[in-house]
Amino acid sequence: MNLNDLLLSDEIFFSLKKHNWNYSKVSNFHYVYNDEIADYYLNIVVKKNDLRLLYTLDLEFSKNRHEDLLYLLNLVNKIHYKGSFKFILKSNSLEYEILKVFPQNTYYNIILDFIQKNSKTNLALLKNFSFLIHNLSYADTYSLDLIKLMFQEIHGHA
């Protein structure tokens, strides 16, 4: 299967649907997840051997807290190494991007597995981040320890 055909394949859709993602009606995005605090959009972009999972957070936040937001983004990007958050000033939106490079003849199932595994964990990360931004907008302070705890990777066995 051509990797570009993967973008909107039934396998990807059903994998994301398990976590309540839907096809997006917004033309710039492939998938959408609607939540109480924010709406999350996902584009899956393939260029040569690169697979990008690009999430956009549609989240209202206080414009007078941009400096705090940038500080928070920098802090979270230092803690969380699997992807990066960025603030897009022009659209007043937040993006989270994961880049994965696959060898040229990678099997479709490996790529599908990567997307499936990341869909659940990335959604949890984005929800935590949205909650943090929401609290930042409506609270006077935030705790550095809380931020570190929210983005800590937990390893172990059950």
Image: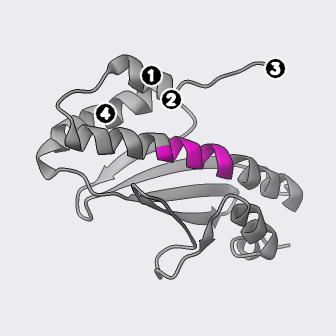
What is the quadrant of residue 2 in the picture? bottom right
What is the CA distance from the residue labelled 3 to the residue labelled 1?
Answer: 21 Å
Q: Residue 16 colored magenta? A: no
The three-letter amino acid code for the residue at tag 4 is: Leu
Crowding near pointer 3: few (<14 within 10 Å), some, many (20+)? few
Instruction: Residue 22 in the image: state x and y as whole percent.
Output: 62, 72
Up the image or down, 121 lies above or below 17; here it is: above
- Of pointers 3 and 1, the one earlier in the residue sequence: 1
Magenta range? 119-127
- The reply to whether discs 2 and 3 touch (Cβ–Cβ < 8 Å) is no
Is residue 126 within the magenta segment? Answer: yes
| Location of residue 154 by image quarter | top right
Residue 72: assigned label: 4
Which comes sooner in the sequence, label 1 or label 4?
4
Q: Answer whether labels 3 and 1 touch (C-beta < 8 Å).
A: no
Secondary-structure class at tag 4: helix
User: Residue at image x 47%, y 49%?
Assistant: 96
The picture places residue 69, in percent across and down from the top left corner, at 25, 40
